[in-house]
């Protein structure tokens, strides 16, 4: 089965990873060079000699869109097309042949449980102090694990979840667990509390990029991220059973931390230099206790530098946008396209183009977006017609300027869920939303005057022919 080592060898082959053999400190030095490379669109980095540690650190695996595709060994547009086809087939009563095709695409949507795996090679011989976990930004409270796959099970239904939630290292055997209040891990902990139980948690670090991508993806609750990763990889994920936890996890992760979270315990977490471009302030979060650490021989530690809009969130966010568009279109069929600008942090601003048929449809789509999965965190939804290219910020602003009257086309919604990282919302986790309906308005929407025609140059064949001489 594919693992992170395979991804590194792919990048080595195409010269998209730079090995650093000089000693670099895990305290700010590795992150400084990683940030510089990320800003310059440089290659991924493999630090072979983090000062004071015996193991390598890799950063920047998702640093560019093409690198993300290379390490996942799939074109994002293919996955997206595949997904769209799948949905069409599912709902269009497929023929037997189509049904078989569908089945063959879904055959990897599960896991393969195996008795043993490379991650089980060593256990109990190291603590968190032996892992080259980084301090990323100067005012970070300490060392943070930023690319973990945090695996839990719903205490009531037994459904698995994997999410990527940062973990601040407190000491050699405890960390923070920064699952935000609306996330599935937090929901599992709430259920454990009701049952008066601690929650078993397994944290896999250094997994195949498709597994990490799946863990970051906003999958609906109840869909197993490990199965989704199998679908992405076109190969079932091999998992092994935990020894001290009732959980299974990827058999060839570089490191797995087995442990638990006690629902009655919280501790101050942060500050942490976040993808908002600010330090997220100190807040109370649950605590993860490590019971046992499993790891491969010469394990590689994978870290993601979280930061402002040039960082690794961007290729990841763009890929998620493309892959999940078919599902969104399925729920809201009038959608033509969406665009999540990176400077809007992917979860604060969305541009949506629609094929408008009836009055009020812009607002209807805006409300539907705000009710769709993690898109509930969006603060500003801008709806435009399908003649506007949503990837062109100027076109969108032109539509807002020429197709809206603020007294009619802006809807403010109060006291809705916001991202926990949003320090500007009126309250923590609760705040306002704005829908801007920048579609062309019709008489039912109050336009009594004639709506003007947009100007287009009439480049007929004669003119085109004449212009050829003057091509610049
Ligand atoms: C590098 C990175 C770090 C992240 N850190 C956190 C975090 O600390 N807390 C959190 O709730 N979400 C974090 N996220 C977002 C979640 O991984 C994402 O919302 C995921 O879909 C949550 O999974 P869930 O719906 O199964 O809870 C992070 C995403 C990335 C790319």
Image (tube, rainbow, N blue to C red):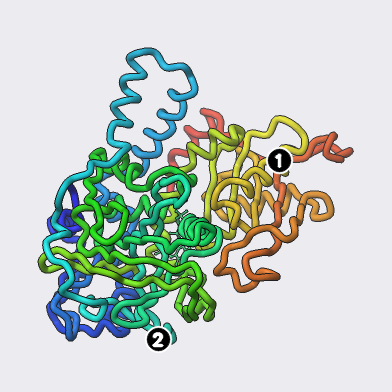
Image point 76% across, 52% down: which residue?
411
Image point 47% across, 71% down: which residue?
286
Q: Nearer the viewer, residue 186 or 53?
A: 186
Looking at the rendering, the quadrant in which ligand 1 lies is: bottom left
User: Which callout, 2 or 1, points at the residue further toward the start of the chain?
Assistant: 2
**View extreme (right): residue:** 448
- Other-residue count near label 1 (Cα within 10 Å), few / some / many at <14 / 14–19 / ≥20: some
* Residue 333 in the image, given as x and y percentages of width and height: 59, 32
Image point 26% across, 77% down: which residue?
128
Residue 61 found in image quarter: bottom left
Determine if residue 470 is in view. no
Q: Which mark is residue 364?
A: 1
Q: Are marks 2 and 1 in contact (CB under 8 Å)?
A: no
Image point 74% across, 47% down: which residue?
403
Find numbered disc 1 in the image and state the secondary structure of the residue it sits on.
helix
Residue 427 shown left or right of residue 47 in the figure: right
- Other-residue count near label 2 (Cα within 10 Å), few / some / many at <14 / 14–19 / ≥20: few
Q: Nearer the viewer, residue 419 or 109?
A: 109
Asked if 200 appears above or below 240 in the picture, the reply is below
* Residue 236 in the image, given as x and y percentages of width and height: 25, 40
Q: Nearer the viewer, residue 2 or 171?
A: 171
* Residue 312 in the image, given as x and y percentages of width and height: 37, 64
Q: Nearer the viewer, residue 375 or 9?
A: 375
Determine if residue 408 is in view. yes
Residue for badge 2: 138
Q: CA distance from mark 2 to mark 1?
A: 44 Å
Q: Is mark 1 within 8 Å of ligand 1?
A: no
Asked if 72 appears above or below 421 in the picture, the reply is above
* Residue 201 in the image, given as x and y percentages of width and height: 36, 61
Residue 84 shown left or right of residue 294 in the figure: right
Find numbered disc 2 in the image and state the secondary structure of the residue it sits on.
loop
Residue 63 shown left or right of residue 444 in the figure: left
């Amino acid at each position: 089965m594919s693992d992170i080592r395979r991804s590194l060898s792919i990048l080595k082959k195409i010269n998209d990873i730079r090995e650093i053999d000089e000693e670099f400190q895990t305290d700010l030095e590795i992150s400084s060079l990683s940030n510089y490379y990320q800003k310059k669109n440089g290659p991924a980095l493999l630090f072979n000699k983090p000062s004071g540690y015996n193991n390598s650190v890799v950063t920047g695996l998702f640093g560019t869109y093409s690198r993300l595709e290379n390490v996942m060994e799939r074109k994002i547009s293919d996955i997206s097309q595949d997904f769209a086809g799948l949905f069409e087939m599912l709902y269009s009563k497929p023929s037997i042949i189509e049904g078989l095709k569908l089945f063959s695409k879904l055959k990897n949507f599960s896991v393969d449980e195996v008795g043993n795996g490379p991650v089980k090679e060593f256990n109990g011989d190291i603590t968190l102090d032996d892992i080259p976990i980084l301090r990323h930004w100067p005012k970070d409270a300490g060392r943070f694990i930023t690319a973990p796959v945090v695996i839990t099970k719903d205490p009531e239904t037994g459904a698995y979840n994997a999410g990527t939630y940062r973990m601040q290292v407190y000491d050699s055997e405890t960390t923070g667990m920064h699952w935000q209040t609306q996330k599935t891990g937090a929901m599992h902990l709430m259920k454990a509390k009701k049952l008066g139980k601690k929650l078993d948690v397994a944290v896999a670090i250094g997994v195949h990029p498709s597994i990490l991508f799946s863990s970051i993806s906003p999958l609906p609750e109840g869909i197993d991220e490990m199965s989704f990763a199998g679908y992405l990889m076109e190969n079932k994920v091999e998992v092994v059973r935990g020894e001290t936890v009732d959980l299974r996890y990827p058999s060839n992760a570089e490191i797995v931390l087995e442990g638990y979270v006690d629902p009655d315990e919280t501790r101050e977490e942060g500050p942490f230099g976040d993808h908002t471009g600010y330090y997220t302030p100190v807040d109370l979060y649950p605590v993860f206790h490590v019971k046992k650490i499993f790891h491969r021989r010469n394990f590689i530690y994978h870290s993601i530098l979280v930061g402002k809009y040039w960082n690794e969130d961007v290729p990841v966010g763009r890929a998620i946008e493309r892959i999940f568009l078919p599902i969104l279109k399925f729920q809201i069929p009038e959608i033509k396209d969406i665009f999540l600008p990176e400077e809007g942090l992917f979860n604060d601003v969305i541009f949506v183009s629609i094929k408008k048929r009836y009055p009020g449809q812009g607002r209807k789509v805006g409300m539907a977006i705000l009710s769709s999965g993690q898109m509930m965190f969006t603060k500003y939804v801008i709806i435009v017609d399908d003649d506007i290219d949503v990837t062109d910020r100027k076109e969108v602003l032109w539509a807002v300027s020429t197709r809206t009257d603020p007294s009619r086309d802006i809807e403010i919604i109060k006291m809705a869920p916001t991202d926990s990282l949003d320090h500007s919302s009126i309250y923590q986790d609760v705040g306002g939303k704005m829908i801007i309906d920048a579609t062309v308005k019709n008489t039912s929407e109050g336009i009594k005057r004639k709506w003007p025609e947009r100007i287009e140059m009439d480049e007929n064949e004669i003119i085109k022919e004449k212009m050829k001489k003057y091509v610049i």
